[in-house]
Image (cartoon, rainbow, N blue to C red):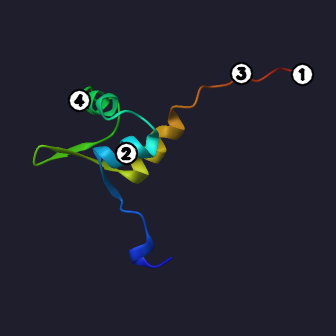
Amino acid sequence: MTKTDEPTAWMTLDEVAEYLKLSRSKLYAMAQGGEIPCSKVAGQWRFFRPEIDEWMLRQRPHTKRRRT
């Protein structure tokens, strides 16, 4: 993969909403409420894709292990 083929590490609100299959308004509310990792630059939300991926993995429900 060349550098130009790599996905942009910093994503806009619209890009992350599409990536996570969330509405723009829901993601905006999550960003304002501190529920998702993000930064605000010049009045616009920016999301670091590696942090979003890590955050998504932490959202998985914990499963109980069966004792045998």
**Earlier-in-chain disc, 3 versus 2:** 2
User: Residue farthest to the bottom?
Assistant: 2
Q: CA distance from mark 1 to mark 2?
A: 42 Å
Q: Are marks 1 and 3 in contact (CB under 8 Å)?
A: no
What amino acid is labelled 3 in the image? Lys
The residue indicated by pointer 1 is: 68
Q: Are marks 1 and 2 in contact (CB under 8 Å)?
A: no
Q: CA distance from mark 4 to mark 1?
A: 45 Å
Q: CA distance from mark 3 to mark 2?
A: 31 Å
The residue indicated by pointer 3 is: 64
Q: CA distance from mark 4 to mark 2?
A: 14 Å
Q: Height in image: 40 above or below 65?
A: below
The residue indicated by pointer 2 is: 16
Element type where label 2 sits in the image: helix
Tag of residue 4:
none
The residue indicated by pointer 4 is: 32
Taking the spot 33% from the left edge, 39% from the top edge, the residue there is 37
Q: Height in image: 44 above or below 4?
A: above
Left or right? Give the position of 62 relative to 58. right
